[in-house]
């Protein structure tokens, strides 16, 4: 069974059988507005937790996306090249950014749960 | 990913007279030049942009400073501070001009409409306080400056704007491009100009603040009209190649560098009597060191303000002052200042985007042809 956790920087992470899928939250896509481009990391890259590893360009601004967990990037979402607006339509589903194998799967539990993230976005 | 909007400087940004309407329309708002303005509505920037190019959009531009000059010598007094011919501006006409300093730098860009003997000025929000002080310092006795902080400004922009106003204020349809007239809209006395900041046909409508919501609601009730925010206004003006003060022009850029020499009146080029005339004349005679140009940047990642440019031989070429994704051209576009030897259309440059050199080509402005009424 999979569980979704969140960062204070508005990424979501879903852990399935030791592989983490990462994207930006529905709240974040709403704040960014129309997304026109997503730059994704190269598969195989080792990233540290909190390292900027993707960029999302909306009509308004460019924003960094940070790796929520340390690990190795295994896959990026091929659909975003053709259709970056997929992030607007399905931020927490088909609009995922990349997958990584976490160096320390236990770090996942330290991220925000859905209730914690909801509280964060309510306060904003 | 940080998505906070950087806090504006104190005093706190103020709402426009249409703040309640924006909230009802579901606008997402943010601070801009001391004001809280709608950045976008639920339709989103791309849809608002396209609606403006195909139908008509209503923008709240009440942040813009509205000033007037009255007195027999008002035109001559203003003329002493700008590069344009103000004395030759006929009643019922409007003109775009620039305040300049002695070094030839641009202090602000503005629209001036003449109504009888009175001049109505629309200046940038972030420069209003500066411009008021500048005018007060230089105006002769007998010319009165009024800051109309009690007025709102709406912009109705797009190819269907004229038919909308023909319905609500029939004489508006008779205005030619850059005409100005005082007309009632739904019984509200308004000052209309046929002009705008999108490259499309359209009007700017100055109104008493307390009547602005009534007129805005009436305009939005028209089937052709949808609201549009600051985000679409920025991408529209960029496609139209129009500079934004504080980004593409400022005190360190001259009209020659900015590609705005057309604003210097014919008579002014004989008399050379405007602030900064000498350095500007020198640049006209001998060339400016750099020019504002349009760029199309390869790929889908916009080159934004501050991005550095390099020439094919690796030397520094200049930098971007505004950039976005162009919905009409479906390409990344930018305004930039480049060395004069690199300013010709077709010149191949590179934009440095996050450490990567991305090809960028100098192209003619505007990026999207203006569609002003003839």
Image (spheres, rainbow, N blue to C red):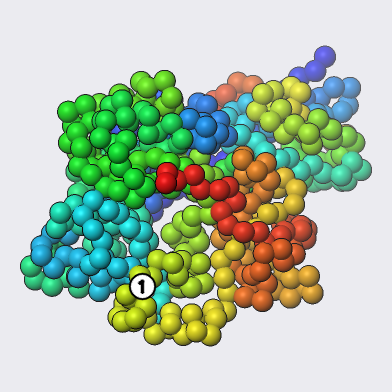
In which quadrant of the rendered image does the N terminus of chain B lie?
Answer: top right
Q: Residue B277, position in %: x, y? A: 37, 81
* Residue under pointer 1: B266
- For image coordinates 76% across by 29% down, the residue present is A96
Q: Secondary structure at mark 1?
A: loop
- For image coordinates 28% across by 27% down, the residue present is B168
Q: Quadrant of residue B44?
A: top right
Q: Residue A25, position in %: x, y? A: 65, 29
Q: Is residue A59 left or right of residue B143?
A: right
Q: In this view of the protein, can residue A50 be seen by the observer?
A: no
Q: Residue A66, position in %: x, y? A: 72, 42
Of B346 and B257, the residue lying toward us: B346
**Which residue is most to the top?**
A1
The chain ID associated with circle 1 is B
- For image coordinates 62% across by 39% down, the residue present is B327
Of B305 and B283, the residue lying toward us: B283
Of A24 and B74, the residue lying toward us: B74
Q: Residues within 10 Å of mark 1 (few under 14, many from 20)?
A: few
Q: In this view of the protein, can residue B303 be seen by the observer?
A: yes
As drawn, B126 above or below B349: above
Of B144 and B94, the residue lying toward us: B94
- For image coordinates 88% across by 34% down, the residue present is A75
């Amino acid at each position: 069974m999979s569980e979704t956790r969140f960062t204070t920087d508005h990424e979501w992470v879903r852990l399935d059988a030791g592989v983490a899928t990462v994207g930006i939250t529905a709240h974040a896509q709403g704040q960014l507005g129309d997304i026109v481009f997503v730059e994704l990391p190269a598969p195989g890259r080792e990233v540290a937790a909190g390292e900027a590893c993707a960029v999302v360009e909306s009509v308004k601004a460019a924003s960094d996306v940070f790796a929520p967990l340390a690990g190795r990037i295994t896959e990026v979402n091929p659909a975003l090249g053709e259709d970056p607006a997929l992030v607007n339509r399905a931020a927490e589903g088909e609009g995922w950014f990349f997958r990584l194998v976490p160096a320390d799967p236990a770090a996942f539990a330290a991220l925000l749960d859905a209730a914690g993230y909801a509280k964060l976005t309510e306060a904003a | 990913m940080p998505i906070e909007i950087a806090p504006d400087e104190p005093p706190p940004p103020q709402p426009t007279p249409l703040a309640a309407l924006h909230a009802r329309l579901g606008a997402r708002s943010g601070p801009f030049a001391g004001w809280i303005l709608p950045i976008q509505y639920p339709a989103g920037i791309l849809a608002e942009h396209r609606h403006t190019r195909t139908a008509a959009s209503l923008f709240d531009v009440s942040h813009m400073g509205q000033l007037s000059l009255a007195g027999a010598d008002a035109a001559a007094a203003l003329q002493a501070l700008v590069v344009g011919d103000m004395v030759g501006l006929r009643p019922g006409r409007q003109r775009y001009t620039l305040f300049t300093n002695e070094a030839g730098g641009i202090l602000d860009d503005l629209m001036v409409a003449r109504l009888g003997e009175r001049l109505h000025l629309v200046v940038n929000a972030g420069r209003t306080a500066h411009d008021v002080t500048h005018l007060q310092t230089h105006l002769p006795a007998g010319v009165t400056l009024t800051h109309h902080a009690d007025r709102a400004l709406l912009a109705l922009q797009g190819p269907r704007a004229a038919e909308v106003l023909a319905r609500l204020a029939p004489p508006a349809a008779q205005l030619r491009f850059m005409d100005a007239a005082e007309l009632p809209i739904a019984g509200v006395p308004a000052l209309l100009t046929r002009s705008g900041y999108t490259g499309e046909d359209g009007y700017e409508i100055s109104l008493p603040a307390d009547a602005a919501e009534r007129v805005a609601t009436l305009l939005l009730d028209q089937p052709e009209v949808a609201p549009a925010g600051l985000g679409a206004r920025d991408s529209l003006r960029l496609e139209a190649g129009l500079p934004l003060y504080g980004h593409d022009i400022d005190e360190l850029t001259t009209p020659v560098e900015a590609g705005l020499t057309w604003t210097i009146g014919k008579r002014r080029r004989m008399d050379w009597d405007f602030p900064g005339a000498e350095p500007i004349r020198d640049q006209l005679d001998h060339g400016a060191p750099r020019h504002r140009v349009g760029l199309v940047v390869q790929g889908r990642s916009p080159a934004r303000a501050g991005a550095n440019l390099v020439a094919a031989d690796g030397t520094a070429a200049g930098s971007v002052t505004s950039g976005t994704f162009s919905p009409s051209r479906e390409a990344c576009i930018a305004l930039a200042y480049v060395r004069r030897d690199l300013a010709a259309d077709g010149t191949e440059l590179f934009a440095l985007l996050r450490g990567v050199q991305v090809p960028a080509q100098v192209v003619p402005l505007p990026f999207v042809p203006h569609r002003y009424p003839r």
